[in-house]
Amino acid sequence: MRNTEVIKVALIGNPNTGKSSLFNQLTGLNQKVSNYPGVTVEKKSGTAKLNDTTNATIVDLPGTYSINPTSLDENIVLQSLLNPANEYPDVVVVVADVENLKRNLFLFSQIKDLEIPAILVINMADQMKKKGISLDIELLKQELNSEVLLVSARKKIGIDRLKNAIVNYKEVNISTIADIADRIDSDFFNRVKSSFNEMSLYKAWLLITQHHNFSTIDQKLQKRIDTYRKDTTKLKKMQNRETILRYQYINGILKKTYNVDTDKATGLRFKLDKILTHKVFGYVIFASILMLIFQSIFDWTSIPMDFIDATFAHLSELTKDKLPQGMFTNLLAEGIIPGIGGIVIFVPQIAMLFLLISILEETGYMSRVVFLMDRIMRRFGMSGKSVIPLISGTACAIPAIMAARNISGWKERLVTILVTPFTTCSARLPVYAIIIALVIPNQRFLGVFSLQGLTLMALYLVGFTAAMASGYLLNKTLKVRGKSFFVIEMPNYKLPSIKNVLYTVLEKTKAFVFGAGKIILAISIVLWFLASNGPSSFKNASEIVKKEYSNQELSSSEVDQKIASYKLEHSYIGIAGKTIEPAIKPLGYDWKIGIALLTSFAAREVFVGTLATIYSVESDNDTTTIKEKMAAEINQDTGKKLFNFPVGMSLLIFYAFAMQCMSTLAIVKRETNSWKWPLLQLFGMTALAYLASLLTFTLLN
Amino acid sequence: MKTTIASLLVGEKGIIQDISYDSVPLKLLEMGCLPGKEVELIQIAPMKDPLYIRVNGSHLAIRKETAELIQIAKSENLCEILKS
């Protein structure tokens, strides 16, 4: 085998520059998402073959306007370039959008000053003619003293030239760009230069101004930094001055090299903005798009979901029939297969939701929604940017909470993270579906609206209202310092790239299946074990039952059923259910529901799976469905049906409010870096759920 | 009362005169909102907040509280100053 050289490349650029398109173009499906060492933030990387002897590992860094971070996402860029705990890239590719070259060059000039080899890639070159832009690329190269390439990631133009330039990265000039330091305060910077002579001056400046964003500064270095941080007002002034000088420098260059015919540039954006951000039509359109999203999540995914449901049920039966009887077969048929099925069933909904959300983001429409919703969301302690997590929350809270990362104010971000689990995630749906089918009559109201459908809609509203109301309360009560500010770019409208959209869907779905999936599967197995084992009375079940019924004449199948039922009651899980029965009796639940409640603290959808396990452990008679079995269930105290209207409603309300998802709690811990907030969610939401269900049951009964 | 971006009407333009540097986030400057640049108010969300502006080639949305920190001279006033 020949030795291949591997070059480490970092992709950096403003949001909406087509950076992801370029990344997808370079790496294809050779992508993976991993974590940065030490920091719990996702890192998207991939490999690209540059030529016969050279490969590249390419890291796609989050979009940023500047190397001075204002959010967790942007901090990654700073960390990956300057934190010694990370592997430094060999070469940085700065992706710029030809239409916003000025602002993009700002970032490029910062990277260049770090004295790292940097290549400027000007993307969307195919749009130049349409937008009336002319650019003297040779002159630009000279002026910037750097490698500059024109590409079109979407049209696959210039990709080979870029690969070539990366291979030859050692030839890239690494001199700094403009003598800005001297023009800000030459005295100050001369002192910095001499005391941080082991690094570039700009890196030293970033350490001084951004020291709080570095996790790994040792005490010695911190001391050196602190000697320059005595006058923070002066530092801020110097930062402002730096920004102004950089723009002056860039303007000087662009005047010579860049020209745009503004008449050509604004037509479509202007017209679309007039409608999409209109104070009436804007909201009407947003509401319609929301309706469309919900419609598609529920209606259009029911066929694949039913198919998945049926396939896994079938697979379970097949396993039981074909494999020799025993412990392993039972584990497979009753634990693992339903467990995996419980994860896979959500894939269609999650994929559909992210398909739509990523289309909305790609087109540039999402920024308009953020603009329209900001003022309203602020009343509830959130920001316009919180809309995206709240919508995503209807599929799954996990990716939703991670999407809150780009909210720059800590308080707004925290409130968003805390209230997102109230939105009705798809894990609640199977619970809602089965209980609604049991207790709400399948009738139409006024001849049009199905009562069951209306109930489901009401539950969505309940979740949404709870999220907003708790946001309002948290906003009033949380004493969190840290200023919030809001500056967002309103990008140009463009057609979504199918490749980008599909890759996003793939990535998010994979994250769900392998992230949340692991926990759900593990719980299913533990659950199965707890239900099929128990103390001595469990082991001697058959003798005890046979003795008890010895004077009655029962068929052998009836005896088997009695044994199974006795076994369940005396298994570990049955004992746990019995233990909490006194606490949940006021809500109308018996110990079997208690078991399901306990297990669904791991994940809500386990509720249905648990009941399925309970009832299938109870009787091996597979002719009736879970729903029929639940409908036939009798409350032993009253002798009436267990799942009557008050019990059903009380359960629905409980599931609407309770924090029953370990994966979400784990993510909240990770994102807030403290156990305080997930515990607040766990106890706050569950207490609310208990009280609300108690009220519901008492009023209805 | 000072004239700021918040006092522009939709469609009006102005030139940035002064920025309250202590309170305005650095990010806004970094995105191109700098003294001497022309601003145009493109759209206002209901309740007059946030504001959608075009400045120095960038299209940005900022909150009213931030817009109030950026002093401008309205373009029409500028014409009058030049005339007189």
Image (cartoon, rainbow, N blue to C red):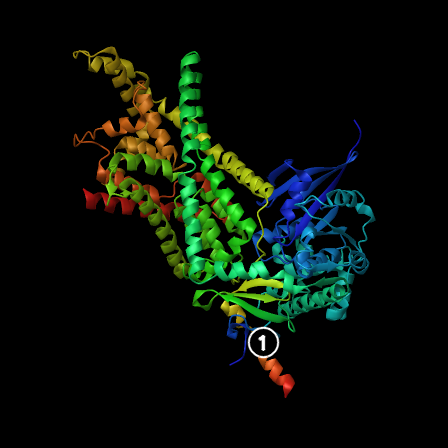
Left or right of A566 on screen, residue A134: right
- Measured as percent of width and height from the top left, residue A542 is found at 28, 14
Whether A157 is drawn above or below B75: the answer is above
Horizontal side of A610 relative to A543 (left or right) equals right
Residue A457 image offset from top left, x and y in percent = 33, 45
Residue furthest toward the bottom?
Answer: B84
Q: Which residue is mark 1?
A: B72
Amino acid type assigned to the residue bearing label 1 in the image:
Ile
In the image, residue A40 sits, relative to residue A476, either above or below, namely above
Residue at position x 51%, y 57% in the image:
A368
**Quarter of the rendering occupied by the N terminus of chain A:** top right
The foreground one among B8 and A282 is A282
User: In this orientation, does residue A83 appear?
Assistant: no
Residue occupying image coordinates x 38% and y 54%: A468
Q: The numbered mark 1 sits on a residue in which chain?
A: B
Answer with the quarter of the image where residue A312 lies. top left
In terms of image quadrants, where is residue A106?
Answer: bottom right
* A677, A116: nearer the viewer: A116
Tell me which corner region of the image, top left, top right, bottom left or bottom right, holds residue A619: top left
- Number of marks: 1
Describe the element under mark 1 as helix, strand or loop.
strand
Which of the image's four quarters has the C terminus of chain A?
top left
| Residue A329 visible to an observer of this rendering | yes
Give the class, few, some or many, for how many residues have Cα within 10 Å of label 1's Cα (few <14, many ≥20): many
Q: Which x, y percent locates residue A182? A: 77, 68
Q: Is residue A461 left or right of residue A28?
A: left
**Residue A170 percent location from the top left of the image:** 81, 46
